[in-house]
């Protein structure tokens, strides 16, 4: 039997790359089997090195709202490359995209471009600390803000317990200033604030978390965080790397009508190119060097290729708001279709959905935070993943990742996805 090209590449890659991949979830360890090596993406499809086509529901973890390899984005990138790939100097497109972001995102009066979501969140915390003169910050259990040291901690034994390092190489000294709270609990936040009075610089969260699977904020939760942070002089930071420009032109903050002090962005503002950004109130952003004392720099920040792709994408979304109605309809058809199939099969599993994001949790419990997400049957999810892959549907290789949909999903493809779901559920429960 001839070995597949993906298997050959994975075996070879492990000789030179830790674990054979450049980001851990790609290794398929949570779902079994070995990763597919992708050669091409176009529209709603991924194509692996063996020539197999898959309808995919990740869209590069969010940014491909219009599907892969969109002609408009591709043409913008090619045209920009004619002038060079990197200057390490200011360009006109940096100014244009910054101005557009400030018009679209309610909280952003000034913005700094960086190279990734991780860089954006690390920088935002640093600026909040510099602005407030305080050291501690609050994050939510199960919310992912990149791999910066301060973010890689696990929960303590109680709501007012400081975090412990969750990865070797992260020191206790680094983690001690990170405070943890469960998502959707205002009571936990109040306890943390009371126990650390006047010491908390920032509260950062994904307003709609997607890194423990999709969960939704309880009614009044985001508003309550806003009130607490205003009262206590805490900088409220929305990590909208996933939700920014996806749930609405102005992200989750526009959708829910809650304006944070700072926002971190990524993915979509590069049209799929490596990019990130952080922005917020003018008085806070004026603390960023060279305007202020908080240092942050990057040779590739505002890269002309990424700016060309991102500006093209954001202009389209800003000028075509009907795109969101289309995305929402696709998301509703798939999530409600999955829920109906589960019901018809007498399978009581939780489906969370908002706009063009959804998650199927293999648990009967409502999923509102990290603890409830962890009640999911991850072994069963792994079987489901493989069953769907066998039927040509490429899902995120983890129970704890949201799926992201695109306008490239036609009615025919939606029906294929739902058909594959029904067959997969019957298979793994037989």
Image (cartoon, rainbow, N blue to C red):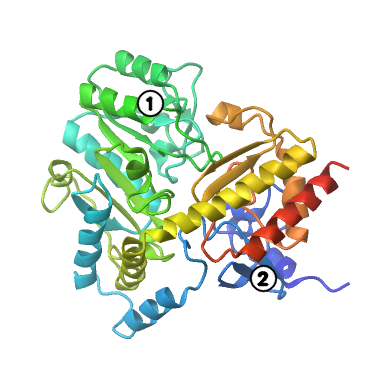
Image quadrant occupied by the C terminus? top right
Query: Residue 285: image x %, image y %?
Result: 17, 46
**Residue 401 seen anywhere in this rendered image of the structure:** no
Q: How crowded is mark 2: few (under 14 residues within 10 Å), some or many (20 or more)?
A: some
Examine the image and state in which quarter residue 97 appears. Answer: bottom left
Which residue occupies the extreme left position in the image?
A: 291
Identify whether 294 is placed above or below 319. above
| 384 lies left or right of 226 | right
Q: Nearer the viewer, residue 409 or 237?
A: 409
Residue 48 in picture, x, y percent from top left: 67, 70
| SS at circle 1 | loop
Q: Nearer the viewer, residue 217 or 336?
A: 336
- Residues 89 and 350: in front is 350
Residue 312, given in percent of the width and then of the height, sits at 34, 70
Badge 1 or badge 2: first in the primary sequence: 2
Relative to 410, is 2 on the left or the right? right
Residue count near mark 1 (Cα–Cα under 10 Å), binned few <14, some 14–19, many ≥20: few
Q: Can residue 361 be seen in this view?
A: yes
Q: Name the residue under label 2.
A: 48
Q: What element carries label 2?
A: strand
The numbered mark at residue 220 is 1
């Amino acid at each position: 039997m001839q070995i597949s090209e993906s298997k050959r590449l994975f075996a070879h890659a492990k000789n030179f790359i830790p674990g054979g991949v450049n980001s851990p979830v790609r290794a398929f360890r949570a779902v079994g089997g070995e990763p597919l090596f992708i050669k091409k993406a176009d529209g709603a499809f991924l194509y692996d090195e063996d020539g197999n086509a898959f309808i995919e529901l990740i869209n590069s973890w969010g940014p491909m709202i219009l599907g892969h390899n969109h002609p408009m984005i591709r043409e913008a990138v090619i045209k920009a490359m004619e002038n060079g790939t990197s200057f390490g100097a200011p360009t006109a497109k940096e100014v244009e995209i910054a101005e557009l972001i400030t018009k679209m995102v309610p909280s952003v009066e000034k913005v700094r471009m960086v190279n990734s979501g991780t860089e954006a969140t690390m920088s935002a915390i640093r600026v909040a600390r510099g602005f407030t003169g305080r050291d501690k910050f609050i994050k939510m259990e199960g919310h992912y803000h990149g791999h910066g040291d301060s973010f890689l901690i696990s929960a303590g034994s109680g709501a007012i317990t400081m975090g412990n390092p969750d990865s070797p190489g992260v020191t206790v000294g680094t983690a001690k200033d990170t405070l943890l709270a469960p998502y959707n609990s205002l009571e936990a936040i109040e306890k943390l604030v009371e126990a650390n009075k006047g010491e908390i610089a920032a509260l950062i969260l994904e307003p709609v978390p997607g890194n423990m699977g999709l969960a939704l904020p309880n009614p009044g939760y985001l508003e309550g965080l806003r009130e607490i942070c205003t009262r206590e002089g805490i900088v409220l930071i929305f990590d909208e790397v996933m939700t920014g420009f996806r749930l609405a032109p102005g992200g989750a903050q526009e959708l829910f009508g809650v304006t944070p002090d700072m926002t971190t962005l990524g993915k979509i503002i590069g049209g799929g190119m490596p990019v990130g950004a952080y922005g917020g109130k003018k008085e806070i952003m004026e603390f960023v060097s060279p305007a202020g004392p908080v240092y942050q720099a990057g040779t590739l920040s505002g890269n002309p290729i990424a700016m060309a792709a991102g500006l093209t994408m954001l202009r389209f979304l800003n000028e075509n708001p009907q795109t969101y109605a289309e995305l929402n309809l696709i998301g509703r058809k798939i999530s409600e279709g999955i829920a109906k199939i589960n019901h018809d099969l007498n399978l009581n599993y939780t489906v969370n959905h908002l706009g063009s994001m959804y998650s199927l949790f293999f648990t009967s419990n409502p999923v509102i935070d990290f603890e409830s997400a962890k009640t999911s049957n991850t072994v069963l999810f792994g079987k489901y993943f493989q069953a769907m892959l066998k039927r040509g549907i490429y899902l995120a290789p983890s129970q704890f990742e949201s799926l992201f949909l695109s306008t490239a999903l036609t009615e025919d493809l939606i029906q294929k996805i739902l058909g594959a779901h029904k067959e997969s559920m019957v298979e793994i429960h037989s």
